[in-house]
Image (tube, rainbow, N blue to C red):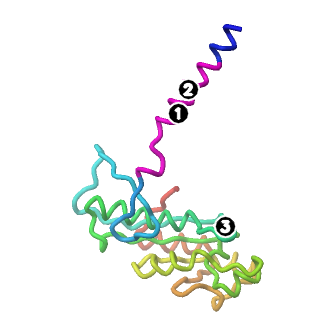
């Protein structure tokens, strides 16, 4: 009896600690560039960003979002820009690209294409893609994946480019001085 009560009490204490150990989404706030997505947390850092830092970073996206949900990988681009601008990096010193392949290519399609494959749903990535590309983010889809899914250039959201392949896009971006972010 005592051992059982002690275990329950211990589980109770652990659950209290676990609940209080994480601040969760309450610490996230809108950033200076994108207000509707790309929420960030203020961080007291010891690994500081050099004052003259210029970021030129490529990201990779292959997983499609759930129907009706924005793709978290696109949100990551907004987070990257927001957190660095909030930390003092000039917006013009941040150049980002997202290479999209696999099932995720449909997340960059217009509503007509997207709806035909998703029970009439609208593409919930539209406004995020428009905001990102307006700030100069390059979004490039894999032509091989697009061909596999019968997605044509005319089916893409505005300002989304199609490369021969994701491999080609990454190779070109590396030659242009982009680093590849592993997240």
Q: Earlier in the sequence, mark 1 or mark 3?
A: 1
Q: Residues within 10 Å of mark 3 (few under 14, many from 20)?
A: many
Tell me the distance, in whole angstroms, between the alpha carbons under discs 3 and 2. Answer: 36 Å
- Spot the residue most to the left: 51
Q: Residues within 10 Å of mark 2 (few under 14, many from 20)?
A: few
> Which residue in the structure is indicated by mark 2?
14
Mark 3 vs mark 2: give the one in front: 2
Residue 164 spot, x, y in % from top left = 62, 80
Q: Does the residue at mark 1 contact the one at mark 2 (Cβ under 8 Å)?
A: yes
Residue 2 spot, x, y in % from top left = 67, 7
Quadrant of residue 49 in the image? bottom left
Quadrant of residue 34 in the image? bottom left
Q: Does the residue at mark 3 contact the one at mark 2 (Cβ under 8 Å)?
A: no
> Which residue in the structure is indicated by mark 3?
64
- Spot the residue most to the top: 2
Q: What range of the chain is rendered magenta?
A: 8-27
Which residue occupies 39% across, 63% down? 30
> Which residue in the structure is indicated by mark 1?
18
Residue 35 spot, x, y in % from top left = 40, 69
Residue 115 shown left or right of residue 175 in the figure: right
SS assignment for the magenta stretch, majority: helix
Residue 106 shown left or right of residue 131 in the figure: right
């Amino acid at each position: 009896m005592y051992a059982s009560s002690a275990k329950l009490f211990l589980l109770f204490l652990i659950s209290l600690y676990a609940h209080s150990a994480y601040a969760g989404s309450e610490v996230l706030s809108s950033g200076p560039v994108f207000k509707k997505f790309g929420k960030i947390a203020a961080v007291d850092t010891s690994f500081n960003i050099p004052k003259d830092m210029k970021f030129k970073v490529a990201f990779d996206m292959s997983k499609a979002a759930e129907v009706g949900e924005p793709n978290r990988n696109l949100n990551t681009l907004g987070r990257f820009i927001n957190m660095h601008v909030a930390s003092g990096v000039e917006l013009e010193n941040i150049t980002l690209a997202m290479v999209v392949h696999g099932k995720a290519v449909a997340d960059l399609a217009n509503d007509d294409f997207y709806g035909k494959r998703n029970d009439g749903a609208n593409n919930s990535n539209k406004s995020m893609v428009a905001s990102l590309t307006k700030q100069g983010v390059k979004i490039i889809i894999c032509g091989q994946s697009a061909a596999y899914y019968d997605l044509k250039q005319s089916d893409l959201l505005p300002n989304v480019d199609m490369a021969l392949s994701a491999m080609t896009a990454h190779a070109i971006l590396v030659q242009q001085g982009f680093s590849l972010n592993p997240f």
